[in-house]
Image (cartoon, rainbow, N blue to C red):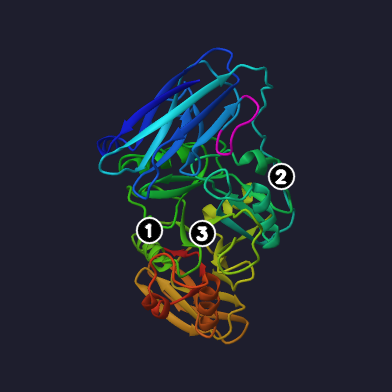
Amino acid sequence: MMTTTVHVTRADQAANPYFYVPFDVPEGTTRIDVTMAHAKAEDCIIDLGMLDPRATDYPTRAGFRGWSGGARDRFFVATDDATPGYIHGEMPAGRWQVMLGLYKLPPEGADVTLTFSHDNAPLALEPQPARTFPVRKAAGWYRGDLHCHTFHSDAAGSPELLHAAAKQAGLDFLAVADHNTISQRRYFHPNSSADLVFVRAMEVTTAIGHANVFGVDDWIDFRMTRPEHGHTLAEMVHERGGLLSINHDKPTIPWDYDVPEIDCMEVWQSHWMAWNWVSLGRYQHRLASGKKISAIGGSDFHQPARLMPEGPLVLARPTTVLWLGELSENAILAAMKAGLGYITESPDGPHLALSVDGQPMGSTVRGPVDAKAEVRGAKGDRLLWFDATGQIADQLIEDNHWVGQFSGRPNLFLRAEIAAEKSRPQIISDFTAALGGGLPWQLTEVELQQQTVRRAISNPIYVA
């Protein structure tokens, strides 16, 4: 056993928010245990992770052994098992490093004490979980949540509980994007099935921006420290065949890196009142600049240690709905990239399928256009039409099975939203009742009373 204390300062934080403490691991080691201790406070939050000798400076392709952020102050890594958030496997001898994420430090800095212990007792060398390829052979609209968490990062609940919550919600697919780690796949790879397909995901999480990586086997280095590292992230994801989505680009953690080539954008995260009009406005601006980006949504649900009842602040609020020729991970990823779907408030929220001259969402057509929006479950609400200039039409939804129409020459794209009108009082009432008093997210009564509530958002159709 070895103990060392380091003093970290705001100067260290300014130089690099990741501070490395090296330690040597002898040949034959089968398990490492690490404990961290420091004076925790609101202004002293230090994250925790580890790299093995194969790691290089940013960006590294190898050597990641785990990340727990601020959720844990101790972990182990062994050949056969590891703490959630950490990667088991081979234990190469040499110089390992504990990563300290200097998220918040007081003016005087902080002392951090680390204790390391090694064990060479014989243990099996367990392989990493193998990806499975379940398929449901049927075309149709499929529902899923593209952003949620387990105790492999900072949620309290297990993968098993999240799995149960997804089944309770009636979902067809789920992307479990734990922060900066892929260890959750120990459960989700073998448990993916044609009843509920699990999509490979990881949330790249930093102090000034979050992004989801979809469809990549490898861990992606999250240690971004400069604005241009947004482009480095996109290159790492795309060279591995994955999709990149900027998450919740709104208060309190907007995207403050360069905006790289992204495939998707999370325009709706958690309840609509969680400042989602800001992220939707930024999405509208990027579309109007000529970018082609698919809109997706995700709850960012952090599974508690018990199964929660259905309600406005749980898993699949909102739900991303995709048109798939079959239910499989490959089909889900292709539809996400193509923009072949819409976002709705919940698994049983309003249906909104936009088409132009028979072409589906995500298509490129030549103007002028004859557009249709098939709407279900929103009688008495409003259908809003948008192009690059902003809102261009507003229609009352006259029935629960209704088709809105638009004819004209939209600028660059055409998309649609369902805005709550008749349903608004009930939505706000359900939201405030679920809170049990007080408003979250620095939300004010002014926003609560004045903001337009969206119930569904279509992907655009692009107009040449």
- Answer whether residue 281 is visible to the viewer in this image: yes
Residue 59 in view, yes or no: no
Mark 1 residue type: Thr
Residue 119 lies, with reference to residue 107, above or below; the image says: above
Residue 171 image point, x, y percent = 67, 59
Residue 267, horizontal then vertical, whole percent: 45, 61
Q: Main secondary structure of the magenta part?
A: loop
Point out the stretch of residues depicted in magenta: 79-86
Q: Is residue 329 above or below residue 223?
A: below
Numbered label attached to residue 150: none
Judged left or right of residue 41, residue 2 is right
Mark 3 or 2: in front is 2
| Drawn side of residue 331 relative to residue 63, left or right | right
Q: Are marks 3 and 2 in contact (CB under 8 Å)?
A: no
Residue pointed to by mark 3: 296
| SS assignment at label 1 | loop
Residue at horizontal 47 percent and vertical 40 percent from the top = 237
Task: Please tell me in which quadrant of the rendered image residue 335 appears.
Answer: bottom right
Residue for badge 1: 252
